DNA sequence: CACATTGTTCAGTATAAATTGAACACTATG
DNA sequence: CATAGTGTTCAATTTATACTGAACAATGTG
């Protein structure tokens, strides 16, 4: 059903998905669309990859959520067809917004909470050390905030 | 056993561990060491975090493997003591070398295999499209290779 | 409106990963 | 050499996550 070439490309994207903490099926679907010369519909993917309808539907949804694929309209066909987005820039910023940003925001809130707790702390012996460590956390956060947009810029087309 | 402040800091690192696809216990141990004013031994960690000896041992090993913690020698004590490394630079490059590099290398090998398969392909209608897609892959790879060292440099203390 | 087509949802199940804890190895010390 | 202290390993178990597939919209079509 799948050629050796297709299998190899899909495998590559399965590995990538793993690195990005995305489900295997998401990597499979993207890989298939990436190497496919023409748009595919849900059922094409399902049959070629031999995965369930549910997985295919969810996988396509995730890929759309950060712009890794887009829908193409095919006249006279009720089905949705999909093609892989191949501009790294688009995908990276979509991924950053959808999957990374929430973590960053969460970290920011936690750090605020940590500083509040630090202030409630009675000023005993160990306090300066704690203060220093939490200062370190703030520095990390600041640097991360500077870096993310820079990285996105570097990826830029 | 753990103060509110300790719990909050540990929780922060548990989240980070999750993002980096590291076991929860690794985040817990690093968080504890990060916020601890003095070095801790395996049993200190185990008891404070209420996790098993096995997890603690493995977690400490992983953290050492990319230089997130270091061992300190305490005279007259057979136990190993650990402190958190707080220089982001050291940890990031350690992490890149241990956890990222293998994936990058693997991807490189796969791409070579893919190009080999492409050449075996009979030169039929769809071949130019395939060639173009695989060219895209190569570009991505090139850009990733350029970016990684640059990011490490940006993190640099 | 009845029926077919397409895609989504979600409870149940399967799979993968982390954790446990007991057995083991190693070393120091009396 | 026997014993206690420390850390590692790994098979069994638990836990988290992804996947399945059947039921369910939603929409088009005769």
Image: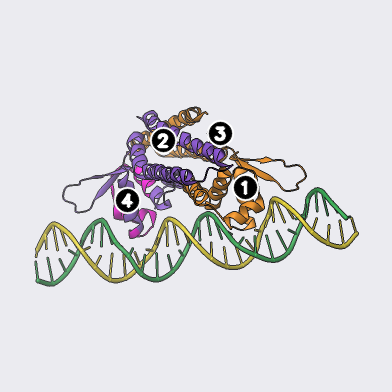
Chain colours: A orange, B purple, C yellow, D green
**Chain of the residue on which disc 2 is drawn:** A
Apparent side of residue A101 relative to residue A126 in the rendered image (left or right)? right
Q: In the picture shown, does residue A30 fall above or below A97? A: below
The residue that label 4 is drawn on is B60
Q: Comparing marks 1 and 2, which lies closer to the viewer?
A: 1
Q: Position of residue C13 (x, y in %)?
A: 57, 68
Q: In the picture shown, does residue B30 fall above or below C29? A: above
Same-subunit check for callouts 3 and 4 = no
At mark 1, the secondary structure is: helix
At mark 3, the secondary structure is: loop
Q: Residue at x 52, y 28 (%)?
A: A156
Q: Residue at x 59, y 54 (%)?
A: A48
**Chain of the residue on which disc 1 is drawn:** A
Q: Which mark is residue A75?
A: none
Q: Nearer the viewer, residue B10 or B63?
A: B63
* Sequence order check, earlier mark of 1 and 2: 1
Apparent side of residue A41 relative to residue D6 in the rendered image (left or right)? right
């Amino acid at each position: 059903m799948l050629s050796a070439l297709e299998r190899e490309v899909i495998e590559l994207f399965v590995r990538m998905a793993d690195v990005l903490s995305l489900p295997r099926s998401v990597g499979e679907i993207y890989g298939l669309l990436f190497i496919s010369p023409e748009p595919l519909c849900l059922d094409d993917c399902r049959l070629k990859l031999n995965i369930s309808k549910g997985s295919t539907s969810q996988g396509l949804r995730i890929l759309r959520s950060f712009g890794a694929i887009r829908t193409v309209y095919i006249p006279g066909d009720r089905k949705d067809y999909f093609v892989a987005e191949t501009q790294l820039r688009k995908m990276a910023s979509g991924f950053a917004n959808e999957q990374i940003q929430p973590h960053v925001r969460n970290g920011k809130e936690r750090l605020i909470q940590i500083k509040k707790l630090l202030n409630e702390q009675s000023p005993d012996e160990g306090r300066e050390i704690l203060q220093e460590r939490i200062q370190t956390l703030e520095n990390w956060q600041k640097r991360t905030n500077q870096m993310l947009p820079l990285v996105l810029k570097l990826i830029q087309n």
